[in-house]
Image: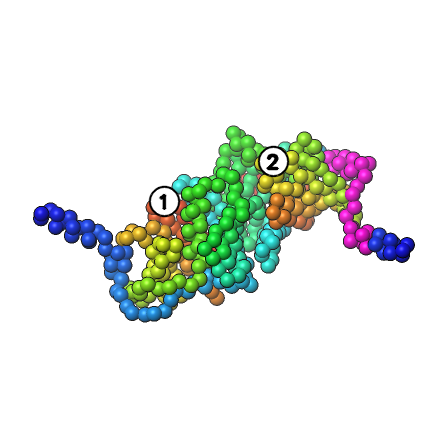
Amino acid sequence: MHKLVYILFFIVFATQAQTKMNNIEATALKTKVKALANTTQTISSDFVQYKHLDFLDNDIKTSGKLAFKAPDIVKWEYINPFKYSILFKDETLFINDEGNKSNVDIGSNKMFKKLNKLIISSVKGDMFDTTEFTIEYFKKDNNSLVYFSPKNEKFSKYIQTFQITFNEKGDVIEIKMIEPSQDYTKIVFTNKKLNTTLDNAIFTH
Amino acid sequence: MRYLLISVCFFCFGCASFSKKNNFNPVITTSNISNPYFANTSLDYIYKANIEVYDNTFGGIFIVKKLGEQQHRIVFTTEMGNKLFDFSFNKDQFKVNYILEDLDKKILINILNKDFKVLITENLKTEETYSFHSETIKKTKLSNKTYYYFETPELSQVIRANNQKEKVRFLFTKINDNIAQHIEIIHSNIKLKISLKSIN
């Protein structure tokens, strides 16, 4: 009987490389992430995006580059297999869809302002706002994994949970956005650099 | 009386079919219509989409998957992966699995349903056949609407017509191995154009 319990325990432990954090660990992570986010003036990174739809044989893979400059300039650019970029700058959303340029004034548009804020806070991982999200903390190998589930009903119809993976330094290495249908979008960052000087030309439309 | 005759003549002429108006020559064939572009269950069909509706243009990713005999799933997402709509087609049944609240308009859903049904319907019964230059044109009915399928010999164009008038035109170009790399859906009675470019 004892053996059986051990075996069961071992199986449960082995299959759950992801364990819940205690309060002290969660607070420590939050402090680390916030400290890093507050000192981040620029971010440049490559990314690969995997769109998972349950009925497809393969995830849809797209890749590109991210550039951020404090306080709120963000460029999110797809390079493969198509060229498409969005740039938030000067209260405007600039879109370049394979050379077709357009822009949206976001000064008066609450939804786009929120999107701008959401992209910045998610790439920094600083979404620890308990009025907006239900938050759960996990340890996964040497990394940390945090689930942010929107409390707003309209928002949660769109995205049920943001699962953000942080490395040991408290930097975001992966974002997974899970829809209520359980389909998801996963973004994996590589070659991420913080606080390097970014040429202004990156942020021209 | 003379006016009546003239108006009857005018009426008859006015009602001439789309095929007559365009000088298509009737020919006798018995072969039916086959659309191979979304017919392979082992493929994920992924397109970069561009939609021009009235004066707005927006892009996204258009995904089609054949799941079984006369069974398809069609999903449209933004480039960033957010789902805008998700439809299931199962024989004559159509189901909206998801649609963004802002797009949840019956008239729009009906148009998309009708358009996508043309994309995914593989086999249709030919009612009449015509030739025009080097093309074979086959007339058929789909959901009680009249369509003309243009073959060169591969399917290059579909036109939905009401009496004389063209309503919607589907263009299939850059065809390679039963995949249309480029698809355009152009509406003539409303300002709507959907352009699809294969990315896989």
Residue on which disc 2 sits: A153
Q: Is most of the magenta stretch helix, strand or loop?
A: helix
Please tell me the numbered disc located at residue B162. Answer: none
Q: Nearer the viewer, residue B193 or A192?
A: B193
Farthest-out residue, left: B2
State yes or no: discs 1 and 2 in contact (Cβ < 8 Å).
no
B197 is higher (above) or lower (below) than A176: below
* Callout 2: SS: helix
Task: Please state if A14 lies on the left or on the right of B88 as rendered.
Answer: right
Q: Picture coordinates of residue A139 (x, y %)?
A: 78, 45
Pointer 1: what residue?
B190
Q: Residue A50, relative to residue A172: is it above or below?
A: below
Please provide percent x and percent y for residue B34.
Answer: 41, 65
* In-image side of A19 versus B83 (left or right): right
Relative vertical location of residue B46 with respect to residue A152 in this rendering, above or below: below
Q: Secondary structure at mark 1?
A: loop
Compared to residue B9, the image places residue A39 above or below, namely: above
Mark 2: amino acid: Glu
CA neighbours of label 1 inside 10 A, class few (<14), some (14 to 19), many (20+): few
**Residues drawn in magenta:** A11-36
Chain ID at mark 1: B
Name which residue lies at 56% across and 37% down.
Answer: A88
Indicate the position of residue B1 as horizontal and vertical percent values: 9, 47
Q: Which amino acid is tagged 1?
A: Ile
User: Is B103 in front, or is B173?
Assistant: B103
Q: Residue placed at 66% from the left, 33% from the top?
A: A132
Query: Residue B198: percent from the left, percent from the top?
Result: 50, 57
Q: Is residue A15 magenta?
A: yes
> At x 45% / y 64%, what residue is drawn?
B36
Q: Is residue B111 left or right of residue B13?
A: right
**In this view, which residue lies farthest toward the front?**
A1
Q: Residue at x 19, y 53 (%)?
A: B12
